[in-house]
Image: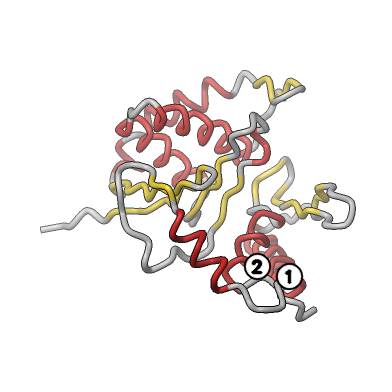
Amino acid sequence: MSVNMKMKLLVQIEERQLMMEVEENLLTDAQDFFTRLDADMNHGWQWEREYTENLNALQRCQLIANRMLALLESDRHDSATLMAAYILQKLPGVTQVDINTSGEISLTEFSRDPLPDSQPSTNKPTTSDSASTDAESNQNPQGKLTAAQASTKARKEVSLVYEVSGGFQFKMLDPEFGDWLESEIFTDRDAAEEVRMDNFQFRFQQLMGQA
């Protein structure tokens, strides 16, 4: 008897966290639904202030995450789970999404970092006041970031690898000027992932005062 495994996607909405659980077979069973979503986006999209004709995988998932937010807020959790499944299928290995709620869809961030072991599964967002208190109490006396805080910040400043015309690339936030810088385009995803991880680790070390 086969056991259908569950995949998890940790959704961060401001101070709230929600662990979405998705049946693994849904990624296959919902292919027709995913195709319809892609067909809808294939015509281009009004991307914030500009019209974007060809959306890449990252931009599509940012749009879908925005839809998922609206579904969660209206308690349509079954439909929201389908959106989570689309993201898991489109960005293999993704574990977390931090949905921007200011209207700037491009600021929604995804991560492939391991999920925290202690994160409980739930069907509704919960306010993480105790988590915020713990983070503050765990901050070192010099006011520097803890390892967990530095990791979270580095994830937001080094994007996931995404597909573009001609290959794969990622973006990095310039902490001095606040500009997003694009990496070179790699023909191989694994090479792009390796360089992305090097940049993530370097930024993490900077935030920890080790670089």
Res 163 quadrant in image = top right
Q: Please tell me which residue lies in front, 170 or 103.
A: 103
For the residue pair 174 and 57, the one nearer the viewer reads as 174
Label whose residue precedes the other's in the sequence (1 or 2):
2
Q: Position of residue 11 (x, y in %)?
A: 46, 47
The quarter of the rendered structure image containing the C terminus is bottom right
Q: What SS does tag 2 mark?
A: helix
Residue positioned most to the left: 1
The colour scheme applied to this rendered structure is secondary structure
Provide residue 73's location: percent of width, then percent of height: 41, 30
Callout 2: 10 Å neighbours few (<14), some, many (20+)? some
Image quarter of residue 140: bottom right
Q: Residue at x 69, y 25 (%)?
A: 47
Q: Secondary structure at mark 1?
A: helix
Q: Which label is found at residue 207?
A: 1
Q: Tell me whether circle 1 and circle 2 mark residues in contact (CB < 8 Å).
A: yes
Q: Residue furthest right?
A: 177
Going 71% across and 25% down the picture, which residue do you hit?
48
Q: Which of the pair 15/169 is nearer the observer?
A: 15
Q: Residue at image x 77%, y 72%? A: 206
Q: Amino acid at mark 1?
A: Leu
Question: Where is 154 relative to 87, above or below?
Answer: below
Mark 2 lies on residue? 150
Question: Residues under labels 1 and 2: Cα distance?
Answer: 6 Å
